[in-house]
Amino acid sequence: MNTQKPRVVVTGSTGAVGRQVCSRLAEEGYHVLGLDRRSGISLNPEVTLQTVDLAVADLRALLTGADIVVHLASGVQAHDVEEDPGHNMLAVAERLLAAADTAGVTHFVIRSSAMVYGAWEDNPVPLTEDAEIRPCPGFRFAEHRAALEKIAREWAEKNKKRSVSVLRTAVTVGEERPGGLARVLESAKNIRTEEGDPMGQFLHADDLAEAVICVVKNNFDGPINVAPDGWMSSALLAELSGPVPRIRVPAFIARLAASIRWQIGLTDAPASIVPYTIYPWIISNDRIKELGWEAQHTNEEAYVVGYEPKLSDQLNAGSRQRLAFIAAAIIVGFVISGIVRTFREPK
């Protein structure tokens, strides 16, 4: 009887999640090839790493003999608002899926995001995998993940022997540095609207890696949410993030201010992310727990890992209040300037 483990190809193998996935798969006996544009050192000597550019490499040759592909190299960041010239990551995913088709790959794993559900006032708390996919318009990060899910599902539907695991993750952070999405959300939350306060879910990179191992071992087919138990209230988020001055303004001013701050380079948070700082997009983890996965880090523990201390943490209450007033005055000034420019523009 042949008990040899399948061969797995992992893209994005030098990232915080990718390194752990490669190492853990090797520990489970899988034959692992890691692909990434950046060179790196494997955590496990049984893992083979190769530096490649997925946009131009011969993917058919790289995937020959592979049974499973774990695609972690999305290449789209939360602050992106335009296509990266010459490196359209959906086109890269399509190349990868075409190569998987030729190579006879039967299981494809992709990293999506809970953001594909969108942040809407009528969202149930928590969202299950049966909820409608409706990312907030203009937020490229979520729109890209939704499009990635669509082309992966279409690939699977061409052959009944194929399966696709779609991991819809909460905001993910690692030990080395806060994730890009976590930083952008934190920046966006500095201006609060009167419409509501966000709840939060934060996933440790190591727990996401274990979720990948879980769906690979179970040959899981379909979407699956990945988040710790429960979520954090807005009050707890404010408490853990420290004494950061936050301005609360009417919704239309918050959106305009976010747009102006983005345009003049004061923030890396595009205005399209604002709904995700107001309305709920909390996810249920019942489905993945049924497969035997358990988060080893709580929301609070993961959040603290992703929190970067700020200069304002060292200020006393009076100084923070003055800073808040100054920030408010600056924001109002920018908003008024933006409105004036809008009306002065020739029709």
Image (spheres, rainbow, N blue to C red):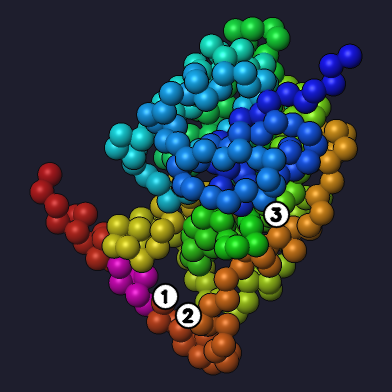
Whether the residues at callouts 2 and 1 have beta carbons within 8 Å, the answer is yes
Compared to residue 335, the image places residue 101 above or below, namely: above
Compared to residue 319, the image places residue 159 above or below, namely: above
Q: Earlier in the sequence, mark 3 or mark 2?
A: 3
Q: Is residue 333 part of the magenta span, yes or no?
A: yes
Q: Which residues are magenta?
A: 328-334
* SS at mark 3 in the image: strand
- Mark 2 — residue? 324
State the quadrant of the N terminus: top right
How far apart are labels 1 and 3 at the CA level?
34 Å
Q: Residue drawn 10% across and 48% down?
A: 346
Amino acid at the residue labelled 2? Ala
- Mark 3 — residue? 204
- Around disc 1, counting alpha carbons within 10 Å, would you say few (fewer than 14), some (14 to 19), or many (20 or more)? some
Q: Nearer the viewer, mark 1 or mark 3?
A: 3
- Mark 1 — residue? 328
User: What is the number of callouts on the image?
Assistant: 3
How far apart are labels 2 and 1 at the CA level?
6 Å
Q: Earlier in the sequence, mark 1 or mark 3?
A: 3
State the quadrant of the C terminus: top left
Amino acid at the residue labelled 1? Ala
Q: Is residue 214 part of the magenta span, yes or no?
A: no
Please indicate whether residue 144 sits to the left or right of residue 67 in the image.
left
